[in-house]
Image (cartoon, rainbow, N blue to C red):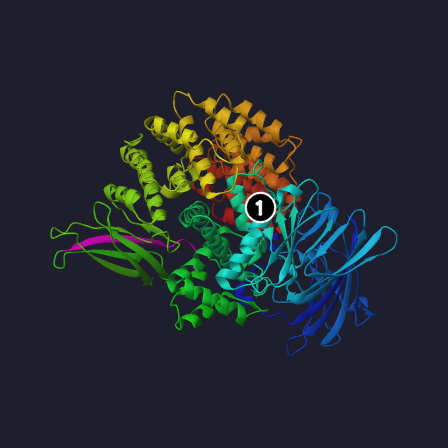
Amino acid sequence: MTPSSSPIHKLEDYKPSPWFTPSVELRFDLDLHLTVVRAEYEVVLQTPEKEPLFLNGESLDFLSIRIDGAILDPNEYQVTPLGILIPDPPKDKFKLIVENRINPATNTSLEGLYKSGSMLCTQNEPEGFRKIVYSIDRPDNMMQFRVTISGDTSLFPVMLSNGNLVGESQLVEGKKEVIWEDPYPKPSYLFALVAGELEETKDTFITKSGREVALKIFVEKGNEEKVGFAFDSLKKAMKWDEDTFGLEYDLDLFMIVAVEDFNMGAMENKGLNLFNAKLVLADKKSATDESFEAILAVIAHEYFHNWTGNRVTLRNWFNLTLKEGLTVFRDQWFTEDMTDPAVKRIKDVLFLKEFQFPEDQGPMSHPILPKSYKEMNNFYTVTVYEKGAEVIRLVSELIGRDLFKKGLKHYLSKYDGQGVTFEEFVSSMEEVTGHSIPNLRNWYHRSGTPLISVKESFSKESNEWIFDLTDTGGDDYPLVYSNSLAVFNREGSLLKEEKRIMVGERDQIRVSALDQEGTKPIVSFFRSLSSPIRLDYKQTEEETIVLAKMETDGVSRFFSFQNLIFDWFRKSLDSGKGENLSTILETIADSFGRGWDKTYHSFYLSFPGLTQISESIGCYEFQKLASLRREAVQSIAVKFTSQFQILFEENRKTIPIQTKEEIGKRRLKNIALYYLLYDPKNQFEKLAVMEQREAKHMSEEVSAMKYLLEIDSKEKENSVRLFFEKWKHDGLVLDVWFAAQVASGEDRSKIAEKLEKHPQFNIRNPNKVRALYFSLARNPLSFHAEDGSGYQFIAERIKRLNEINPQMAAALTKLFSPVSKQKGELPKIAKIELESIANLPNLSKELGEIVGTILNSL
Ligand code: ARG
Ligand code: ZN
């Protein structure tokens, strides 16, 4: 079957499965190349009329099938590339035993059972289980699992699965067997198995009811010292879920395994989370502040899935956002509580604007509840995750966090052990508030970022300013918005705060003039992005400056300053030259005296990157933007040289620990260094060189190298060499090294071409692919190079990945989404490249769906 003819799964076609399998006994006889898998299911008919039984199974080597002990006659079933069809099962209820073989060592898709380093491990969400054994592989089929694993003791001293270890025995010489039982029924996507030579590290957690939970993190030898932060993060997450929602962990054992080759961040398999090693392993020498924070967030995220995702799971994959949007919202809230709420919110909104807004404006746009898909793997998107989280945040804004907590508890107890849809979640929230929330459900069906326009007018009679808000695209799916707003006077004193709920397409807000002359108050709308929208409101420069300095909401203050910067780009593009920067400079000058939190101030001072700028102002001429950006950053550097020197010196001595104070110092010092490096007289490069040499924390070391690369310093080669010599033994740190060399500047495809021949590059390792290819494709100057070299380079790698790892190939192809916005020949060149991908002889389903969607937009 060719991908374009592969079936489309439609939400409207969803039907419960006619058959289900309430329990399964799995047996694995492990071998790197030839693993035998046997499944024994209890099979039960759920429909009044008997229907054919279909077991999903792909890339499996079929061995045998039996019903109630009797081998089936070959004319009673058909084995196809997609599974086994039993047209007329003999009874309504029976035992089915099916056996097949698989080859984990050659499974480079990293889905199903595969080999990573010296271990075997699984990834089954969404549909990897069918690459392990025949099954009814859908989330609404929940099974109780008993898993027996046998294998060579020297190859597989550790053998893990979900739940509790209930048996372990020595078999013949050199072989052993273990048995795992998970008391909680779960869909196949939450099944996990890990086996190999792994080091076990331990900790414990006492739950609020006094139960002791054993915590274990398994790592490859040599990494045992790098798990401390992960354990702390896990314990914080467990405690927070108890304190915030009363949710306690429900088994006596919680395990995490760090895996080197992993397509995504991590996976919430019941009691046995699998993690991309980069999201577990960290110490001050080898991890940046950003990676520490990512570890905290992802460990929490996967842990939180134990309730939102596992105990209450999904009815079908269309509802993925039910568990992901909700769980992302929970992990964001957690990080807000653990760190700094304003800074965390700024990061999340920046991410949303840089990645989700463009996705929702481009060819891949889809509602958080997709209506159809060919390959579910393609729908683990920033829309389903991050916009999904924004919709949940909106619910919490609409009903308040206390009711939200109540509603979540209600939802989890009412639907415990079931597979549900977003409807059950929404109605649970409505039940605790006692009323319906109009239009909320439409957020699940409408794609695109709503654009709310604000028109202001003055009413002489009432001496009021009238703000008319209109949702410009809300005809089909009118929405509900939470609009947190504040009113300021012309000097920036806060006069009034209000939370408005806007139902439908329009709202009118009337605010008294500031005096008898009708002076206009300054209004700040949708503070902290209280709904996931774009705002079309032309505030005057004077008003924007006041908000950029005086907004009491730190998030909105930050974004007002960003707006000031974007306005400067707009003006400069219009006039064809860099305009006067005085308002930006004045606002920065003002910021030095505010005594803000250090991390906050460092964010405020960070000059937006090219992608952010281009998305915010809708201009995709990256050469022009880059030269304007350089001009602006240089002017800031020149104007504030002495302030940045002071900031740098003041924060120079940092202690390499993860406290708010030290992280703040490192960030502020780094941002100061960044500007100093843009000084046109190049007098500060030696500072960066020294920073790198004397660094006590990876954040210092990496920043210095990145900045030298970005400004194309004559020191950059030395810096890169030094970094490599120091870190060549550590694959995770080398990822940063690969990435930094292609992430900024022009013509980096050539560098990437050299780097991919480096002995430590490996196209089979997703972290390396992300480091090199994704970083290059996210560097607009190189990817959208006018001669098409960026497109050609990336297209060629997509073709290679198609054969190795279709998920990575498809994800990389998504970065072609913005090509239709490019000028000149570029869209044409991209089209030729994409067509040649679409014509690949072995085009995978994953890649076929994405390349087809983008081609349709060209
Ligand atoms: N459920 C996992 C998480 O968000 C991610 C699984 C991603 N799966 C995929 N096929 N991309 O925690
Ligand atoms: Zn998740």
Task: Tell me which secondary structure the magenta stretch mostly adopts.
Answer: strand
* Element type where label 1 sits in the image: helix
Can I make out residue 294 in this image?
A: yes
Give 816 or 500, whichever is nearer the viewer.
500
Q: Which residue is mark 1?
A: 229
Residue 458 included in the magenta stretch of the image: yes
Q: Quadrant of the N terminus?
A: bottom right
245 with respect to 204 (left or right) = left
Q: In which quarter of the view is residue 567 placed? A: top left
- Percent of width and height locating residue 246: 52, 64
Q: Give the answer, above or below, for where 582 lies relative to 28.
A: above
Name the side, left or right, on which 35 lies relative to 393.
right
Identify the residue at image location x=33%, y=57%: 483
In this picture, is 225 found above or below 14? above
Tell me where residue 597 appears, x and y as whole percent: 39, 42
- Boundaries of the magenta span: 446-459
- Point out the residue furthest to the right here: 173
How would you rate the neighbour count of disc 1 (Cα within 10 Å): few for under 14, some for 14-19, many for 20 or more? some
Query: Which residue is at a point 11% across and 53% down the rendered structure image?
Result: 516
Query: Which of the two residues, 254 or 277, is positioned nearer the viewer here?
Result: 254
